[in-house]
Image (cartoon, rainbow, N blue to C red):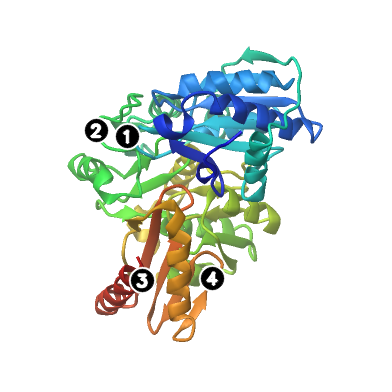
């Protein structure tokens, strides 16, 4: 069977519904995944989906494919991705599949997969594609049951988080899947909040639920300032990424949040390893060392960072994009709801405003994440050409794309694993140095683009 293999990406399957996922491909993905786990002597699969308009149709076809290989399917309905992960751990399912395209536009959809307690990525995702191409499927008569796991997830959070102070926060879930669930948890715990776009609507009528884009956070920033809130939380479409707005309306990306979490965790766990991705600021690495931790820089990508967290037995890992993984007191996957509650617990305990956590932290100047649209079949070639250009000019790191260490700053270029795009991030010790590096680096990329 011929398929478009470009949608089988590094750590998920993702494409445009009309072009890539319409028709019987979701059914065959179900058959391939069912075959994959059956050959590992597994058979139970937990299945969830986000609130995209195409999700229910895709999920039904996926489940048919799983059942036709003999799998026992538990359909947990429309839930945030972390609730799917939670269900796999809490109820001890063999595996799980989430139908979601995270923060992508409404015409996208896809699949995130869990086998055992780990996310599927890399060559293992390519094996799913191989099974479909070769039409190499197990046969069987499985079954499907529907389950509501929301109450289990809510109770888990409510039991673990109690606050002494009356914190007042803003939340913007961008009409993604997370809004109604966050609302219920915050009300049960007693957190006072201003909610923006918390209604679930797969058309995303107000802005895309992608908190890594500053434009998508402007209404939340305005709310924090207008209502004098302690902070604001921006969630992505399926609830596994978080951006935070401090009390002054400043955006705190994942690396800044990791500084706060690292201080808390290293205060009780000296010498622990802390994992972060290649896009994070040098200030995070410096603070981890200052606090007695061991900083480990790793590849960007939710499955890659999650795997590294478990491999290194680290209590926490994080990415600039707001994926935050707690193995400390939790299961070791990215959950924006849990991450925001951990931050509120620190605020409750420390009696500090968020901005005060960065006193004494060296300030660097950096660009936001810059995305340059290029075709999927060209992005890795462009990265390789830029790497060759710089390899004899400056020290480079190529664990993920190419990170060029200029005097007094650095510049990163990597291929996005979820979109037809290049991702750029640049940092300098002063604004002048940042601008100089940015001008040169973007010019070199343009040359090869």
* Numbered disc in front, either 1 or 4: 4
How far apart in space, not on screen, are marks 2 and 1 (Cα)? Answer: 7 Å
* Numbered disc in front, either 2 or 4: 4
Asked if labels 3 and 2 touch by Cβ distance under 8 angstroms, the answer is: no
**Which residue matches tag 3?**
427
In the rendered image of this protein, does residue 367 appear above or below residue 181? Answer: below
Identify which residue, 287 or 42, lies in the foreground.
42
Judged from this view, the residue extending furthest toward the front is 2
* Numbered disc in front, either 3 or 4: 4
**Which residue matches tag 1?**
174
Q: Is residue 204 left or right of residue 191?
A: left
Could you tell which of marks 2 and 1 lies nearer the N-terminus?
1
Could you tell which of marks 3 and 4 lies nearer the N-terminus?
4
Q: Is residue 169 left or right of residue 338?
A: left
Could you tell which of marks 2 and 3 lies nearer the N-terminus?
2
In the rendered image of this protein, does residue 176 appear above or below residue 316? Answer: above
Q: Quadrant of residue 107?
A: top left
Badge 1: residue crowd in 10 Å (few <14, some 14–19, many ≥20): many
How far apart in space, not on screen, are marks 1 and 4 (Cα)? Answer: 35 Å
Q: Position of residue 169 (x, y in %)?
A: 32, 39
Q: Position of residue 68 (x, y in %)?
A: 69, 18
Judging from the image, what secondary structure is the residue with disc 3 in?
strand
**Which residue matches tag 2?**
206
Q: Image quadrant for the N terminus?
A: top right
How many labels sit on residues? 4
How far apart in space, not on screen, are marks 3 and 4 (Cα)? Answer: 17 Å
In the rendered image of this protein, does residue 393 appear above or below residue 446? Answer: below
In the rendered image of this protein, does residue 234 appear above or below residue 83? Answer: below
**Which residue matches tag 4?**
398
Judging from the image, what secondary structure is the residue with disc 4 in?
loop
């Amino acid at each position: 069977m011929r398929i478009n293999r470009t949608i089988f990406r590094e750590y998920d399957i993702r494409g445009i519904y009309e072009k890539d996922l319409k028709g019987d491909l979701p059914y065959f993905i179900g058959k391939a995944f069912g075959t994959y786990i059956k050959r590992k002597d597994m058979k139970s699969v937990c299945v969830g989906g986000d609130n995209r308009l195409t999700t229910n149709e895709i999920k039904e076809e996926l489940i048919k494919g799983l059942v036709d290989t003999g799998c026992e399917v538990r359909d947990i309905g429309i839930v945030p991705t972390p609730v799917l992960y939670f269900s796999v751990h809490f109820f001890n399912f063999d595996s799980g599949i989430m139908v979601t395209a995270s923060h992508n536009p409404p015409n996208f959809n896809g699949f995130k997969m869990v086998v055992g307690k780990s996310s599927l990525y890399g060559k293992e995702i390519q094996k799913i594609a191989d099974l479909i191409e070769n039409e190499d499927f197990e046969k069987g008569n499985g079954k499907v049951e529907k389950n509501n796991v929301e109450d289990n997830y809510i109770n888990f959070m409510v039991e673990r988080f109690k606050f002494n102070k009356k914190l007042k926060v803003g939340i913007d879930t961008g009409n993604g899947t997370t809004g109604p669930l966050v609302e219920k948890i915050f009300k049960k715990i007693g957190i006072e909040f201003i909610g923006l776009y918390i209604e679930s609507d797969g058309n995303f009528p107000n802005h895309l639920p992608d908190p890594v884009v500053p434009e998508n956070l402007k209404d939340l920033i305005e709310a924090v300032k207008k209502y004098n809130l302690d902070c604001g939380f921006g969630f992505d479409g399926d609830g596994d990424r978080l951006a935070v707005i401090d009390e002054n309306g400043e955006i705190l990306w994942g690396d800044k949040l990791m500084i706060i979490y690292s201080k808390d965790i290293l205060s009780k766990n000296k010498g622990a390893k802390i994992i972060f991705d290649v896009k994070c600021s040098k200030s995070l690495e410096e603070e981890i060392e200052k606090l007695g931790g061991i900083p480990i820089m790793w590849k960007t990508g939710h499955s890659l960072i999650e795997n590294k967290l478990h491999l290194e037995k680290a209590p926490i890992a994080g990415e600039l994009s707001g994926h935050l993984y707690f193995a400390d007191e939790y299961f070791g996957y990215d959950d924006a709801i849990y991450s925001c509650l951990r931050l509120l617990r620190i605020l409750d305990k420390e009696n500090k405003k968020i901005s005060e956590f960065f006193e004494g932290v060296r300030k660097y100047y950096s660009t936001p994440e810059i995305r340059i649209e290029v075709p999927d079949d060209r992005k890795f070639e462009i990265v390789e050409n830029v790497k060759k250009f710089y390899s004899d000019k400056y020290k480079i790191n190529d664990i993920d794309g190419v990170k060029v260490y200029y005097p007094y700053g650095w510049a990163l270029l990597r291929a996005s694993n979820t979109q037809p795009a290049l991702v750029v991030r640049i940092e300098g010790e002063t604004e002048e140095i940042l601008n100089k590096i940015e001008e040169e680096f973007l010019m070199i990329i343009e040359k090869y683009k």
